[in-house]
Image: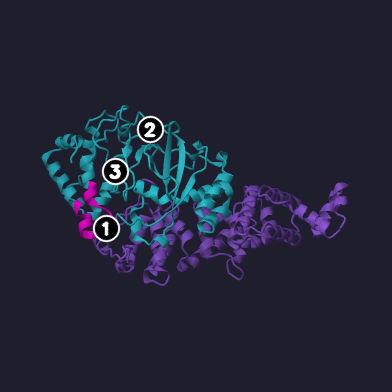
Amino acid sequence: MPSNLYKSALAQLRPTERKRLADFFSKLKRIRKHSKQPLDGRCIADNIQSESHLVGTESWGNHKAYYRFLRECIPIEGRRKASLGVIRHYDQVCARHKSKGIAVHHLPKPELLRYSYYRKLIEDLLEIMAGKDARVNFQEKRISCSEASEILRRYWNVQKLTSAQKLSRSSPVWATMELSAGADRDDAQFMAEALALPVLLELASSSAQDAVLYEFRYPSKAVRNHRFPTVADAGSYYLFSPSPEIEPSIDRPETCTGWTLPLNGRPSQPELLHDNMPLSMLSKAPRILGEVQKCQNL
Amino acid sequence: MSKSVKERFRIRLNPDGTLNPDCIQEAGQVWVKHWLQERLSGFDPYFPIDHRYGGDPEALVAAFLRDMGSGHVSFELISRVVLDLLKSAFSIERKKKAAPWLENTLRLCQQVVLPMTKDWFVNQLKSLSENPAQYEKSHGGYEISKEILYAAIRQAPGIEGSSTRVCWERLLDETKYASLALAGLFLDFPGKLTYLKRWWKAGAKTPEQELDYMIYSALRSDPDKEKIRRAIAEAKRQYQYPEDLVEQINKALQSNGINAVSDAIAAWCRRTSKSFDALRKAGHQTQFHNFAQAF
């Protein structure tokens, strides 16, 4: 259902712009249906229309930032874009509007958790902490996930980290927290599904997978610029659910963060964004949960 | 990407939902090159990359390659394109700016053996080992050269009799590359012991930590402590390890819960009724070491 933010931003567009935006949506919606691509344009289009937290530096309900976002979504007139060209254009627009979700002022928990399956970071950490041989052994799969976790614990020395090693490949960083009950944080598959991670893995067999899920824990105060995730942050990744249009309130902790769109009936997890930070803020080594297998139910 | 290139790809799935590799072959080399170039640069409209939780762009390609196996025509096609991307990343036109796909292309080569790239990596090894400073200068610095070496471990290891062995051996004398060279020459612990003295002399950046890890790792793969200790003692005697290396090995052994090599010698002496303890108690360190060397 279209959000009030979307409706009021849409009302600011000129009639011709509204028509072209409608064309953009119809092209988006055709993507999965016709080309069998592993992305779902209908979800993306629906998400854009239900977004309610993309307000930039303005207050709750202010449509200025979202109006600018929608205007940019409209492809330049005269340039006909095929369906994948639409996605390319949309991703470029999203990149310019990242970290514009409403600021999160009340964090229900003092500690944040960052889950990732960015394998290179683990390899880099093994190299920094235990040496090049450790990285080679991990790459060659001669050490298991639990062994890699143990190696990082054994050799962890935060002094060895420089500002070059960051939490994430790009900013902003997606994080979660221990707010909801029932999340099995020792089970890689469980957490990957609760966070809606393994969407592409359906295209390769489980035996070919090499996705290792790991967890960082850090104080929420150690990172800056906490924000709600929005459609612009998710980009063309369609397994994202914009937060319901409820003004964040400290009295209702569940309204203070976004929530994941979990897979396979796993419990939804809180999610928020913050600026990327050097890993030197960590006091503990990351914990490797294990390998994520192919997700059967997407 | 031109319209004709864009429209050439039609995704096809196997009954189990995995990608049918035939569709990559049918798309042709031009499409595959555009696709990989974009994907390995961080953008893919066909198979979107999850930027939220840090999906590695090369991971899906590696999984496709593992699934299809090296005998499939699409495997060969992707290998050829990867080689093309490696070459174009270092072409004259690109000298001043690193190609955006380079890092992930190298990471792909670190994960899957792509026989077509072997000659390219052999040539890189030759150039790098002959003049590391010059190589770094013309290949974007140490970090990229290091990643090339990591990939070369997979694509052109220095196994006995290989054409690259001499290059890896030369790199063993280079401080910055000694540890990677050791990994490129030998993946098992007894093999590493052969070159340990030379590696130690090169003065790797953090040799104590790396040595500790090597022993830790050896014990993880073979929990027979006595066997590991015997292998070290034998290598120490055969290759005449210097005192500081022996001292560091002993520290590493102790931190891994094993008696030092010298203690092993003492135990051996006791078992064989040689009067070694007296020698040590008397503080005759030189004799002690001579004795240890002899062991």
**Circle nearer the N terminus (3, 2):** 3
Identity of the amino acid at label 3? Cys
At which x and y percent is residue B151?
Answer: 50, 59
Q: CA distance from mark 3 to mark 2?
A: 18 Å
In which quadrant of the rendered image does the N terminus of chain A lie?
top left
Is residue B221 shown left or right of residue A45? Answer: right
**Disc 2: which chain?**
A
Determine which residue is flagged by label 1: A37
- Residue B141 in view, yes or no: no
Determine which residue is flagged by label 2: A225
For the point 25% across and 32% down, the residue is A246
Q: CA distance from mark 2 to mark 1?
A: 34 Å
* Chain B tint in image: purple
At which x and y percent is residue A283?
Answer: 52, 37
In which quadrant of the rendered image does the C terminus of chain A lie?
bottom left
At which x and y percent is residue A30?
Answer: 19, 54
Determine which residue is flagged by label 3: A94
**Magenta region, residue range:** A29-44
Is there a contact, CB below 8 Å, between mark 3 and mark 2?
A: no
For the point 40% across and 69% down, the residue is B76
Is residue B135 shown left or right of residue A239? Answer: right
**Circle nearer the N terminus (3, 1):** 1
Identity of the amino acid at label 1? Gln
Query: Which quadrant of the view contains residue A6?
Result: top left
Residue B205 lies, with reference to residue A281, above or below; the image says below
